[in-house]
């Protein structure tokens, strides 16, 4: 069994990006600039945005964090999006989800200029991804693809089962694994909460991507010998005995599943760090060959 080490791989990618930023400067090209919009004070969202901004700084990117209270109206947020669309110095930006209930998320996603949509959530970019055209691939699935690629995990002709069909993880993951590309060329089964006999499907799978947000959902008896298991789940589970008062759990019962796998991602240190590296990569792509 080999660990797909997202922490080390993400570090390697971020170092490559930092070198590229230096090379860009030498060529007179623009320093990539990522902006992030955070509405409200949700703890997890603040942590995620904070790590994205710090990662930008470490790679030599410019970053801007726009923080507004949870009472911000949809109109005000759309104005911020409009300003970022117009701002030539900003190459790419993200609006951290989830948004407060009174804001229509889809309307905001569709307001982001396609060329700056480094989250890859705009419907046009999702369509381009499905057609295998150049675009921004959503950060988490992009991170998984890069992890599989860097470890040369065989995917062609394999049966992949994706658990969860969210727009940010499961659904794009199923599209990417089915594309005529490497990693890809899998026969893909996309499963969700209405799927029947899930364990039968996972037992027949060569590759399982688990993204449903239920701690330790995938057990050893659901996995065949030699399978590749990618655990996307991140759930805070109360653990009063620990200093933080909680532990982070993935969607896979790691201790019992890992011995059966050819490759597996740990939580933490698997998919999570790859997500940030992918966002930086998308921002670098967005900066393109713009002059300083
Ligand atoms: P979501 O809540 O939007 O979607 C969950 C999906 O799981 C749904 O499509 C649902 O149909 C499916 N599902 C629920 N119960 C099921 C069952 N019993 N069998 C099969 N499918 C079932 O989730 P999401 O936003 O995709 O996030 C999933 C997990 O991944 C969460 O723990 C989240 O925190 C984590 N996540 C991690 C990263 C990262 O960077 N590592 C990024 C995004 C999300």
Image (cartoon, rainbow, N blue to C red):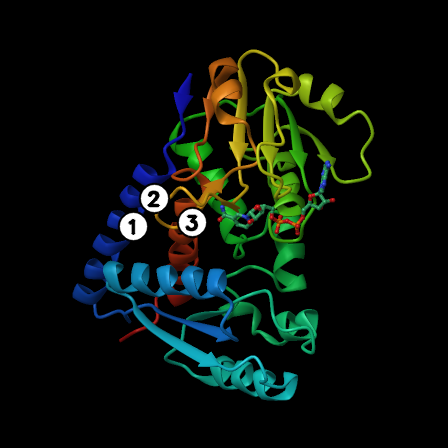
Which quadrant holds the N terminus?
A: top left
Instruction: Give the residue at mark 3.
Output: 245
Circle 1 residues within 10 Å: few <14, some 14–19, many ≥20? many
Which label sits in the foreground, 1 or 3? Answer: 3
Q: Report the Cα–Cα distance between label 2 and label 1.
A: 6 Å
Q: Are marks 2 and 1 in contact (CB under 8 Å)?
A: yes
User: Percent x, y for residue 58?
Assistant: 24, 59
Depth order, front residue of 246/116: 246
Q: Report the Cα–Cα distance between label 3 and label 2.
A: 27 Å
Label 2, secondary structure: give it: helix
Label 1, secondary structure: give it: helix
Instruction: Give the residue at mark 2.
Output: 10
Q: Is residue 56 visible?
A: yes
Q: Quadrant of residue 149?
A: top left
Instruction: Give the residue at mark 1.
Output: 14
Circle 2 residues within 10 Å: few <14, some 14–19, many ≥20? many
Q: What residue lies at 39% left-to-right and 75% top-to-bottom?
A: 65
Compared with residue 29, is residue 188 higher up or lower down, i.e. above or below? above
Q: Are marks 3 and 2 in contact (CB under 8 Å)?
A: no
| Label 2 residue near ligand 1, CB within 8 Å | no
User: Percent x, y for residue 213?
Assistant: 61, 44
- Ligand 1 is found in the corner quadrant, namely top right
Mark closest to the chain's N terminus, 1 or 3: 1
């Amino acid at each position: 069994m080999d660990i797909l080490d997202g922490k080390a791989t993400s570090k390697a990618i971020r170092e490559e990006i930092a070198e590229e930023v230096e090379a860009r400067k030498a060529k007179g090209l623009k320093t990539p600039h990522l902006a992030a919009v955070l509405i409200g004070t949700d703890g997890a969202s603040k942590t995620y945005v904070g790590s994205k901004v710090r990662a930008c700084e470490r790679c030599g990117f410019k970053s801007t964090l726009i923080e507004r209270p949870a009472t911000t109206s949809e109109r005000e947020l759309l104005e911020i999006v409009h300003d970022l669309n117009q701002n030539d110095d900003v190459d790419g930006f993200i609006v951290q989800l989830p948004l407060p209930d009174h804001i229509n998320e889809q309307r905001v996603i569709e307001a982001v200029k396609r060329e700056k949509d480094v989250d890859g959530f705009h419907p046009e970019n999702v369509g381009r991804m499905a057609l295998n055209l150049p675009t921004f691939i959503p950060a988490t699935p992009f991170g998984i693809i890069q992890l599989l690629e860097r470890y040369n995990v065989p995917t062609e002709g394999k049966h992949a089962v994706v658990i969860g069909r969210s727009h940010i993880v499961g659904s794009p993951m199923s599209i990417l694994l089915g594309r005529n590309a490497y990693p890809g060329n899998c026969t893909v089964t996309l499963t969700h909460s209405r799927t029947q006999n899930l364990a039968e499907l996972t037992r027949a799978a060569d590759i399982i991507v688990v993204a449903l947000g239920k701690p330790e959902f995938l057990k050893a008896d659901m996995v065949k010998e030699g399978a590749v298991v990618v655990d996307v789940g991140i759930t805070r589970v109360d653990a009063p005995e620990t200093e933080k008062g909680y532990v982070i759990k993935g969607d896979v019962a790691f201790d019992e599943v890992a011995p059966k796998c050819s490759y597996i991602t740990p939580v933490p240190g698997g998919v999570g760090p790859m997500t940030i590296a992918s966002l930086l990569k998308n921002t670098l792509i967005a900066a393109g060959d713009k002059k300083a």
